[in-house]
Amino acid sequence: MRDIAAQIVENFEDVLEEQDITLTSPEDDEKDPDNAARLYGSTYYDLLDATESIVIQTLEQAGISRDKYIADQFSGNF
């Protein structure tokens, strides 16, 4: 589920890139000046967590049980 959520968040990042918008993060002072990420630190991870939660809720509403997928971790294939 984390990979699916990350793909959705990546689409948001693409839109932010197209619009030349960078969202602030509490960790901005730690960000490498060469890092061009539009979403960074806790701002990114909060959005990722919220997106994963929506994906999981959608699966549960469709009757798919939690033993059919893995949550809260990346597969390593994304």
Image: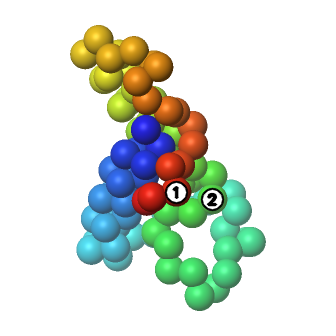
| Quarter placement of the C terminus | bottom left
| Residue position for label 1 | 76
Crowd rating for badge 1 (residues with CA inside 10 Å; few <14, some 14–19, many 20+): few
Q: Is residue 19 above or below residue 23?
A: below
- State if disc 1 and disc 2 touch (CB < 8 Å): no
- Residue occupying the point 67% across, 74% down: 31
* Amino acid type assigned to the residue bearing label 2 in the image: Gly
Dot in front, 2 or 1: 1
| Quarter placement of the N terminus | top left
Q: Is residue 20 above or below residue 12?
A: below
Q: Work out whether residue 11 or residue 61 is closer to the camera in this orientation and state it.
A: 61
Q: Work out whether residue 14 or residue 73 is closer to the camera in this orientation and state it.
A: 73
| Residue position for label 2 | 41
Element on which disc 1 rests = loop
Q: Position of residue 12 (x, y in %)?
A: 33, 57
Crowd rating for badge 2 (residues with CA inside 10 Å; few <14, some 14–19, many 20+): some
Residue 11 picture quarter: bottom left
How much space separates mark 2 and mark 1, taking CA atoms?
20 Å
Element on which disc 2 rests = helix
Residue 33 picture quarter: bottom right
- Residue occupying the point 47% across, 19% down: 67
In the image, taking residue 42 as reference, residue 36 lies left or right, namely left
Q: Position of residue 25 (x, y in %)?
A: 61, 59
Residue 61 visible within the image: no
- Residue occupying the point 63% across, 52% down: 42
Q: Work out whether residue 23 or residue 5 is closer to the camera in this orientation and state it.
A: 5
Q: Position of residue 51 (x, y in %)?
A: 41, 39
Q: Position of residue 59 (x, y in %)?
A: 32, 22
